C-alpha cells in the first residue's frame, strides 16, 4: 500500500525560484511508487494566483506529473481540526518569546485566524491522515514554509507527519523567479509548452531531429531539405531564392534529390 505525500504551495514556490532539488525530490517520490498529492487548499491557492502565466503553468505541471488533486473535506468534519490549530497549545510562545496560556486564539504566526492559509492546509492534511483515501498508507505533508520547523507539534497535537523531504534546503525567498520552461526542465520527459500572456497553454510539438540517410546513420535535416514540400518538391519560394539555397548547400552535399 503506497504512502501519500501532500505538497504545500511553498513547494511550487521553491521550484519557481530555481530550487531544482525540490523537483528532483518530487520525481523521486513518483518513481518510487508513492502517491504525490495536492490538497484542495493548495490547488485553490494555485488557481487563484494573480499572474495568468504562473497560474496556468502550475496547473499544467500538476496535470503533466499526474499529481492527485485531493477533494475538499467537509467543513463540519474538519471543524475540530480548525479549532485545535487556531488555538495555542502548551509550549507556544508569543512574538516576544514569552509563554502563552494554552487554549487562547493565536495572535500571530500559523493559525492566526480561521482564514490563515496554514490553518487550512494543516487542517486538511490532518483530515486526510485521519480519513485516508482508499489504498493509501501513511500520509505526510511536504512544506518548505515555516511549518517545517514545527514537526513535533504538528505530529503530537494534530496528527500531521512531515515528509523527510522537508529537509531539502530552501532557496532564499528573494531569489529571482525562473521561467516556467526552466522549471519544467527540472523534470524528465515533460512536453514543451507555451503559455500565452492570458494563460492559454499550447503544447509545442517536438522538433524533428534527424533523418535516416541511405548508407549512413542519422543526419540532421538541412535547411535545403526543410524547405521541400511534403512530396519532395521544392516549397513555393521565388526561383532566385531556390537557386541561391541550392547553390549554398550543393558543396556540402546536403541538398538531396527529390
Image: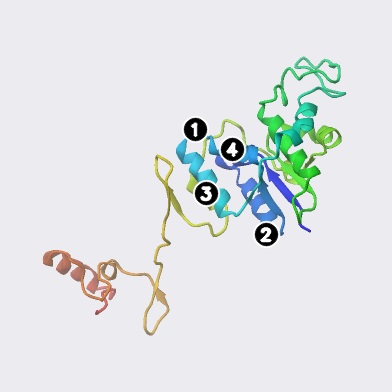
Residue 60, numbered circle: 3
Q: Which residue is mark 2?
A: 31
Q: Look at the numbered discs 1 and 4 and tell me whether their residues touch, using CB distance below 8 Å.
A: no
In the image, which is nearer the foreground, mark 4 or mark 2?
Answer: 4
Bin the neighbour count of mark 4 within 10 Å (Cα to Cα): few under 14, some 14-19, many 20 and up: few
Q: Quadrant of the C terminus?
A: bottom left
**Residues at marks 2 and 1, CA–CA distance in whole angstroms:** 32 Å
Bin the neighbour count of mark 1 within 10 Å (Cα to Cα): few under 14, some 14-19, many 20 and up: few
Bin the neighbour count of mark 3 within 10 Å (Cα to Cα): few under 14, some 14-19, many 20 and up: some
- The one nearer the camera, 83 or 8, is 83
**Residues at marks 4 and 2, CA–CA distance in whole angstroms:** 26 Å
Q: Which residue is mark 1?
A: 50
Q: Look at the numbered discs 4 and 2 and tell me whether their residues touch, using CB distance below 8 Å.
A: no
Residue 131 in the image: x percent, y percent?
78, 45
In the image, which is nearer the foreground, mark 2 or mark 1?
Answer: 1
Bin the neighbour count of mark 2 within 10 Å (Cα to Cα): few under 14, some 14-19, many 20 and up: few
Q: Which type of secondary structure does the marked residue at label 3 adopt?
A: helix
In the image, which is nearer the foreground, mark 1 or mark 4?
Answer: 4
Which image quarter: residue 233? bottom left
Q: Which type of secondary structure does the marked residue at label 2 adopt?
A: helix
**Residues at marks 1 and 4, CA–CA distance in whole angstroms:** 12 Å
Q: Is residue 33 left or right of residue 194?
A: right
Q: Which residue is mark 4?
A: 44
Q: Look at the numbered discs 2 and 1 and tell me whether their residues touch, using CB distance below 8 Å.
A: no
Residue 117 in the image: x percent, y percent?
66, 30
Amino acid at each position: 500500500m503506497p504512502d501519500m505525500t501532500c505538497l504545500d504551495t511553498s513547494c511550487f514556490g521553491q521550484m519557481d525560484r530555481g530550487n531544482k532539488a525540490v523537483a528532483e525530490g518530487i520525481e523521486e517520490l513518483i518513481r518510487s511508487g508513492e502517491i504525490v498529492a495536492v490538497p484542495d487548499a493548495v490547488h485553490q491557492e494555485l488557481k487563484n494566483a494573480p499572474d495568468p502565466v504562473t497560474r496556468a503553468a502550475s496547473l499544467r505541471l500538476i496535470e503533466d506529473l499526474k499529481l492527485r488533486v485531493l477533494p475538499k473535506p467537509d467543513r463540519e468534519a474538519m471543524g475540530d481540526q480548525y479549532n485545535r490549530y487556531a488555538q495555542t497549545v502548551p509550549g507556544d510562545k508569543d512574538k516576544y518569546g514569552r509563554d502563552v496560556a494554552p487554549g487562547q486564539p493565536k495572535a500571530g504566526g500559523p493559525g492566526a485566524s480561521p482564514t490563515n492559509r496554514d490553518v487550512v492546509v494543516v487542517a486538511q492534511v490532518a483530515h486526510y491522515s485521519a480519513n485516508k483515501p482508499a489504498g493509501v498508507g501513511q500520509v505526510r505533508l511536504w512544506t518548505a514554509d515555516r511549518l517545517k520547523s514545527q514537526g513535533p507539534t504538528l505530529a503530537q497535537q494534530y496528527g500531521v507527519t512531515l515528509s523527510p523531504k522537508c529537509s531539502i534546503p530552501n532557496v532564499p525567498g528573494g531569489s529571482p523567479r525562473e521561467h516556467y520552461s526552466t522549471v519544467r526542465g527540472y523534470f524528465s520527459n515533460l512536453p514543451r509548452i507555451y503559455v500565452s500572456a492570458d494563460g492559454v497553454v499550447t503544447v509545442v510539438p517536438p522538433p524533428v531531429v534527424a533523418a535516416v540517410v541511405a548508407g549512413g546513420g542519422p543526419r540532421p535535416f538541412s535547411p535545403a531539405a526543410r524547405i521541400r514540400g511534403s512530396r519532395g518538391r521544392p516549397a513555393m519560394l521565388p526561383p532566385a531564392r531556390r537557386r541561391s539555397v541550392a547553390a549554398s548547400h550543393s558543396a556540402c552535399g546536403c541538398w538531396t534529390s527529390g
